[in-house]
Amino acid sequence: MMLSVKDNSRAQGVRLPPPKYYLHIASDCKFYADDRGVVLSDLAAAHSCAVSVISNCMRYDTEEQDWRGWRIKIADDTGRTLVIVLFQATLRGAFGPYRASG
């Protein structure tokens, strides 16, 4: 049995536009929807972008003292969540070991 590739755009040399990703920032109490999105080459690039956003939020938002529970939900054009990136994980990696106060 032979498979047809007539409808396969890659086989015909047609380039699809790069995907758009939406980086929604959320905690248990707040949700900041990204209604503009960002065009990136792939999901790995979207993950890197989310890590950068998290680092900037943690560095420059001096009002938020406890980032546990905060996350970025990376979604596609349909609104489907593809990856969730946690702030706490980035805190350990970017700023040294996490130390709980108390």
Image (cartoon, helix red, strand yellow):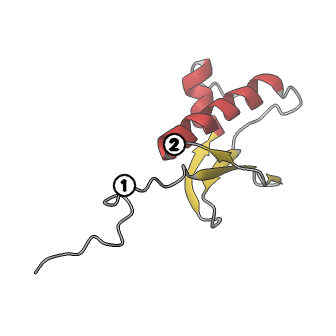
Q: Residue at x 68, y 27 (%)?
A: 55
Mark 2: which secondary structure?
loop
- For disc 2, the neighbor class at 10 Å (few under 14, some 14 to 19, many from 20) is few
x then y, percent, for residue 25: 74, 47
x then y, percent, for residue 45: 52, 38
Spatial CA distance of label 1 from label 2 is 18 Å
Judge by depth and name the residue closer to the eye, 64 or 49. Answer: 49
**Residue 59 image-quadrant placement:** top right
Q: Residue furthest right?
A: 63
Regarding residue 11, the answer to whether it shows in the image is yes
**Residue 97 image-quadrant placement:** top right
Q: Quadrant location of the C terminus?
A: top right
- Disc number at residue 41? 2
98 vs 25: above or below: above
Mark 1: which secondary structure?
loop
x then y, percent, for residue 93: 54, 25
On the rendered structure, is 20 left or right of 13? right
Q: Residue at x 54, y 52 (%)?
A: 17
- Disc number at residue 13? 1
The disc labelled 1 sits on which kind of residue? Answer: Gly
Q: Residue furthest top?
A: 96
Q: Quadrant location of the N terminus?
A: bottom left
The disc labelled 2 sits on which kind of residue? Answer: Ser
Q: Residue at x 63, y 38 (%)?
A: 50
- For disc 1, the neighbor class at 10 Å (few under 14, some 14 to 19, many from 20) is few
The first of marks 1 and 2 along the sequence is 1
Q: Residue at x 60, y 59 (%)?
A: 76
